[in-house]
C-alpha cells in the first residue's frame, strides 16, 4: 500500500511539473522555461540591448539565492551542442574574468576562485567563487555554461551561504530539461 501511495504521488508530481506554466518559451532555440526550476521561482525576463546578447531569465529562492540564465548567440552560427567548442571555452574564460571585473569596479571587496568545489554535471563547464561583498559579508557565485541548439546557455547562481550549493543539482537538472538537454520527466 505504501509503495502504491508513493507511486501515485510521483505520477501526480510529474504531471504537475510537466503542466507547470511557462515563464518563457524560445521558439528559435526550442527552450521552454517553467516558472519554477529546482526550488527557484521566476522573477523576470530581461532582453539585453545589443544584438547577439540575447536575453536573461532571473529566478530566486527562499534563502536569498538568485539565478540568472542567459541565452545568447553573439551573432554566431554553427556552435555545436556541448562544452568543447573553442567558442564555448572562450565564453567560459569570460566567466572568471567577469567576476574579477566586478570586484575591481568595487562590486566586491574580493573574489576568490574556489578550486575544491565538486562538479555538478559533466554536461556543463563550471566555475565557483567566494565573494566578499562591500559590507564584508560573504556570498558564493556558481557559474555554468554550455552550447545548446546553437545558443550559449550561461547560468550564474549567487547565494548567501555555501550550504545553498546542495540545492543546485536540482536547479541544474531542471535547466537541462528546459533547454532539451534531458527529456522532461513524464508519468509512466
Image (cartoon, rainbow, N blue to C red):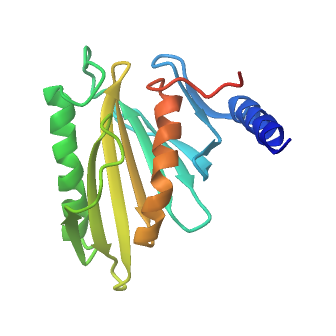
For image coordinates 31% across by 33% down, the residue present is: 146
The residue drawn where x is 44% and y is 43% is 69
Q: Nearer the viewer, residue 4 or 80?
A: 4
Residue 17 place in picture, x, y as percent: 70, 35
Question: x and y percent of residue 101 in the render?
Answer: 20, 61
Name the side, left or right, on which 141 lies relative to 39: left
Position above or below: 157 against 92: below
Image x and y of residue 168, in percent: 46, 53
Which corner quadrant holds the C terminus? Answer: top right
Which residue appears farthest toward the bottom when viewing the image?
136
Q: In this view, does 159 lie above or below 19?
A: below
Decide: is 98 above or below 86: below
Specify the quadrant of the image occupied by residue 121: top left
Left or right of residue 93: residue 135: right
Pick out the residue farthest to the front: 1
User: Looking at the image, can residue 52 be seen?
Assistant: no
Quadrant of the rendering where the N terminus is positioned: top right
Residue at 82% x, 45% y: name it: 2
Q: Work out whether residue 2 or residue 12 is closer to the camera in this orientation and state it.
A: 2
The quadrant in which residue 97 appears is bottom left
Amino acid at each position: 500500500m505504501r509503495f502504491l501511495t508513493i507511486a501515485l504521488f510521483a505520477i501526480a508530481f510529474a504531471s504537475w511539473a510537466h503542466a507547470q506554466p511557462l515563464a518563457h518559451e524560445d521558439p528559435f532555440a526550442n527552450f521552454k522555461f517553467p516558472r519554477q526550476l529546482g526550488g527557484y521561482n521566476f522573477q523576470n525576463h530581461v532582453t539585453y540591448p545589443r544584438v547577439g546578447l540575447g536575453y536573461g531569465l532571473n529566478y530566486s529562492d527562499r534563502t536569498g539565492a538568485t539565478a540568472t540564465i542567459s541565452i545568447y548567440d553573439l551573432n554566431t552560427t554553427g556552435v555545436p551542442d556541448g562544452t568543447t567548442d573553442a567558442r564555448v571555452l572562450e565564453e567560459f574564460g569570460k566567466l572568471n574574468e567577469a567576476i574579477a571585473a566586478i570586484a575591481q569596479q568595487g562590486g566586491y571587496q574580493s573574489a576568490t576562485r574556489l578550486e575544491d568545489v565538486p562538479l555538478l554535471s559533466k554536461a556543463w563547464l563550471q566555475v565557483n567563487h567566494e565573494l566578499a561583498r562591500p559590507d564584508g559579508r560573504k556570498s558564493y557565485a556558481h557559474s555554468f555554461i554550455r552550447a545548446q541548439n546553437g545558443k550559449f546557455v550561461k547560468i550564474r547562481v549567487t547565494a548567501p551561504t555555501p550550504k545553498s550549493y546542495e540545492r543546485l543539482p536540482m536547479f541544474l537538472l531542471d535547466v537541462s530539461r528546459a533547454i532539451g538537454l534531458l527529456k522532461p520527466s513524464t508519468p509512466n
